[in-house]
Image (spheres, grey):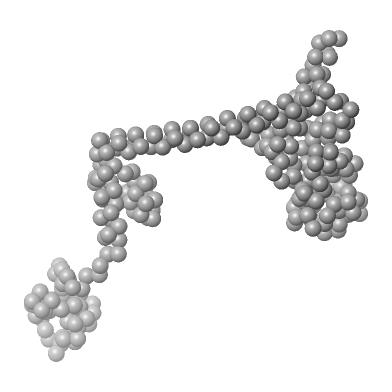
Amino acid sequence: MTDFDAAEVRRLRTEEQLSVREIRDRTGLGRNRVYELLRGVPPPERTRRPNAKDALRAEAVALRSVGHSVPDIAQRLGVSRSTAYLWVRDLPLDRQSQSGLERRRVRSRAASEARWATHRRTRDEAQAAVHAAAADVVGGRLEERDLLLGAAIYWCEGAKSKPWRRYDHVQFVNSDPGLLALFLRFLETCGVDRAAPTYRVSIHESADPVAAAGWWAEELRLPLARFQRANVKKHNPVTVRRNTGEGYRGCLVINVPRSRELYWRIEGMIAELFRSAADRTSMN
């Protein structure tokens, strides 16, 4: 049967609520022909696919009605911000709900700031105490040359904290075995055994990082097991480098874990040295 007219196809759709496939099976018409004859006729409800996000959309509307922002709704429901916006763009925030939400945010920020203020105060008090003890080393026991020399070496060559970037951590990088040996001696004087830090070779790719690590370990009597994977730097052919050949072993990075207080001790000794130097200059 292939001579059904448009009226019959529409009747099958509207009265019997058949799907396109069922109409094709009943009439023998092609898919495109059936779609053409059904143009403008809505499909039966039973053939509509459920929208998996209908529940999320309803939840988004509910969240918006109590004052949640689009980013907050997106985060809570695990959808993109653009999707959340499309769902609630016709629902402006209620001013009363919005003001209540803003008040909660202000309270949350204030509580967080109070917690951090306590942390910063405790940290600063501990730092001041360490500074005072380190200054006493400089002022009362100048014979402790290992400490003073080590602190000065570190202040010249080590990583330092900046006002805009706190870095209260001891990390020393150098290519001079003599300076590195002096710094290791300084660490031992401060109670840091050579097995405590981690070590890393920083070297150009033209050299052998494994051989360099072995050389540093032997030269400075360091445990090879404490060496981390080397930092291998790409070679720029345009740059004329003279640190090449068998004698080139890169830099050694000494990283001291849990060294915030040690950094503060160094900081305190240097500050007192600078102050003493300034006082002596003014006296002359």
Q: Residue at x 44, y 35 (%)?
A: 111
The picture quadrant where one finds residue 45 is bottom left
Residue 130 at x, y percent in the picture: 71, 30
Residue 205 at x, y percent in the picture: 79, 55
Q: Residue at x 88, y 43 (%)?
A: 181
* In front of the other: 38 or 188: 188
Q: Is residue 17 left or right of residue 249?
A: left
Q: Judge whether residue 48 can be spotted in this image.
A: yes
Q: Judge whether residue 236 can be spotted in this image.
A: no
* In front of the other: 127 or 217: 127
Q: Is residue 65 left or right of residue 266?
A: left
* In front of the other: 254 or 201: 254
Q: Residue at x 81, y 25 (%)?
A: 138
53 vs 161: above or below: below
280 vs 222: above or below: above
Q: Residue furthest top?
A: 283
* In front of the other: 38 or 57: 57
The N terminus sits in image quarter? bottom left
Q: Residue at x 64, y 35 (%)?
A: 166
Residue 235 at x, y percent in the picture: 77, 52
The picture quadrant where one finds residue 34 is bottom left
The C terminus sits in image quarter? top right
Q: Is residue 31 left or right of residue 11?
A: right
